[in-house]
Image: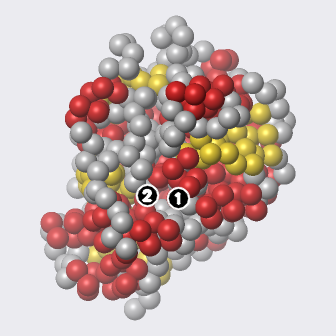
Amino acid sequence: MNNVVNLPPEDMPRQWYNALPDLPTPLQPPLDPETKKPVDPAKLAVIFPNSLIEQEMSPERFIDIPEEVLDIYGLWRPTPLVRARNLERAIGSKCKIFYKNESVSPAGSHKPNTSVPQAWYNKAEGVKRLATETGAGQWGTALAFASRMLGIECVVYMVKVSFEQKPYRQIMIRSYGGEIHPSPSDKTNTGRAVLARDPGCKGSLGLAISEAVEDAATREDTKYTLGSVLNHVLLHQSVTGLETLRQLAMIGEKADYVVGCVGGGSNFGGFMLPFLSRKLSGEDVTFVAAEPKACPTLTRGDYRYDYGDMARLTPLLKMHTLGHSFMPPPIHAGGLRYHGDAPILCNLVAEGLVQARAYFQTECFEAARLFMGVEGFLPAPETSHAIKAAIDLASEAKPGSTIVFLYSGHGLLDLGSYDAFLQGGLSNYALPQEDIEAALRDCPRI
């Protein structure tokens, strides 16, 4: 039996799904970092194009995908839905396990689903240059790819620990024509201030965001792009869940469990939100978000307003947070080392509609090695968290259940991480409660 479900290209979604109208509890508004009042959209225009600001707040359930974006999507979309039969046999599963393979994109992950439209909307408004941050380098690679496709410039601030751990991501970004700097860097006031206090600082996503936002806010030709967290990012990523719904319908299946790894929430949010209406209508579908114990935002973070970056330049968002000053341990899943999460996802966790699980990095690498040994593909360290959660669910779920997870990216540029794992050089980090409490003390009281 064929294990791969391919959606015909003509059936690729031509609209994104916007979950805002369907949330049981409306999102709290983003707040101005200076006044602590709901942010004026005009202030956001300093760093974002108007079209993306409109999408961020849109009441429309579906938004058309521009034709030029669809043309670029066609380089790799639709992506395959794969039945992981070998994994099922290896773990003795009585459940069916499927994965949506986003590693087939040019950048090797789900990230181009939003980098391409973000670059397109910016170019349409005359923007010449984009500034962004990246953790593991997947988002930076995706934005460099999109910028090259659309003929605009790109600068990336990469968290220093990942910059050092993952040199081949640097090469990919530069090969696409992007400029890249380790964060903290000497290119911004924010970076220079951190280096003055701590010359050996290994960085965080919150810090890299501060540098990218400062870069964009101080240049007239530049706008800022974010690879996760914001509503319009999850909107663009909904193409993965929409395709999966159609692929499951092609073979007469329905997902009982929808699983993804979570850092800022882009891949999991985009994957599970198109299934939300089923959940809200009373169907028995479970959403599982898998995160690191070293950065347990959803499982141990506080649900409150906080800044999205270390320098307090961004609007305040109501989200699960470990505190914007939180400096995460140097685990190898660099894309999951963010102190906050997407407000839409946090809203659903707070409502009890999404459950979160946290794992040590070594048990996730073990799951990744098993997956590679039986399915043949090497997952990114971030993706290994979703694989671990899917394996655990297969041992708990009712026999005959269908588990679907997002295979968010490959690990072919993460071989240094796998070498460290195979050499026994990885350590597990469980974040001490006192570290969380110390970081949360810096959060504003709203």
**Residue type highlighted by circle 2:** His
For marks 2 and 1 on the same chain, the one whose residue lies earlier in the sequence: 1
Asked whether 122 or 252 is in front, the reply is 122
- How many dots with numbers? 2
Asked whether 193 or 3 is in front, the reply is 193
Badge 1 density bin: few <14, some 14–19, many ≥20, Cα 10 Å = some
Asked whether 270 or 15 is in front, the reply is 270
Q: Which mark is residue 332?
A: 2
Q: Give the residue pinned by disc 1.
A: 165
Q: Dividing the image into 4 quarters, which one contains the N terminus? A: bottom left
Tell me where residue 188 appears, x and y as whole percent. 68, 30
Q: Tags 2 and 1 in contact by the CB under 8 Å rule?
A: yes
Q: Is residue 346 above or below residue 120?
A: above
Q: CA distance from mark 2 to mark 1?
A: 8 Å
Secondary element under disc 2, as helix, strand or loop, is loop
Residue shown at the point (71%, 34%) measured from the top left: 187
* Identity of the residue furthest to the bottom in this view: 1
Residue shown at the point (55%, 36%) measured from the top left: 199
